Amino acid sequence: MTTSTTMTIRLDPQLKAKLGRLADGTRRSRSFLAAEAVETYVDRELAIIEGIERGLADIEAGRTVSHEDAMASVRRAIEVAAGGSA
């Protein structure tokens, strides 16, 4: 059994009405849909932060490629995809 906790948030009345329409249309509760939306948002934002942290660690460790080298690699890939040779 999963446990949950309660959190109170303030919503614009129009957003609350839209959430209600969505709840009616999906036969889910507003609470369920709001929790699902918050979870999706939090997961996405945490993934972004973790990606930034990994990038900063790569920079500190010297695991980088110059812009010029990266663009040369992209140009070669485009040329190969277009039927040329690298």
Image (spheres, rainbow, N blue to C red):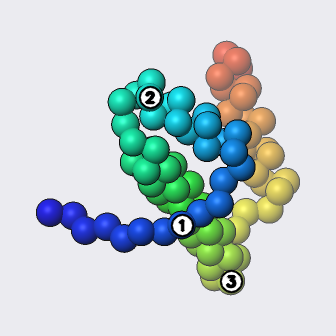
60 sits left or right of 51 in the view:
right
Q: Is residue 47 visible?
A: no
Rendered image: mark on residue 43? none
Percent of width and height locating residue 58: 63, 74
Q: Which residue is mark 3?
A: 60
Mark 1 in CB contact with mark 3 (< 8 angstroms): no
Q: Secondary structure at mark 2?
A: helix
Q: Nearer the viewer, mark 1 or mark 3?
A: 1
For disc 1, the neighbor class at 10 Å (few under 14, some 14 to 19, many from 20) is few
Percent of width and height locating residue 46: 55, 66
For disc 3, the neighbor class at 10 Å (few under 14, some 14 to 19, many from 20) is few
Above/below status of 12 relative to 86: below
Q: Is residue 5 visible?
A: yes
33 sits left or right of 56 in the view:
left
Q: Earlier in the sequence, mark 2 or mark 3?
A: 2
Which residue is the extreme one toward the top? 83
Q: Secondary structure at mark 3?
A: helix
Q: Which residue is mark 1?
A: 8
- Residue ID at (66%, 25%): 80
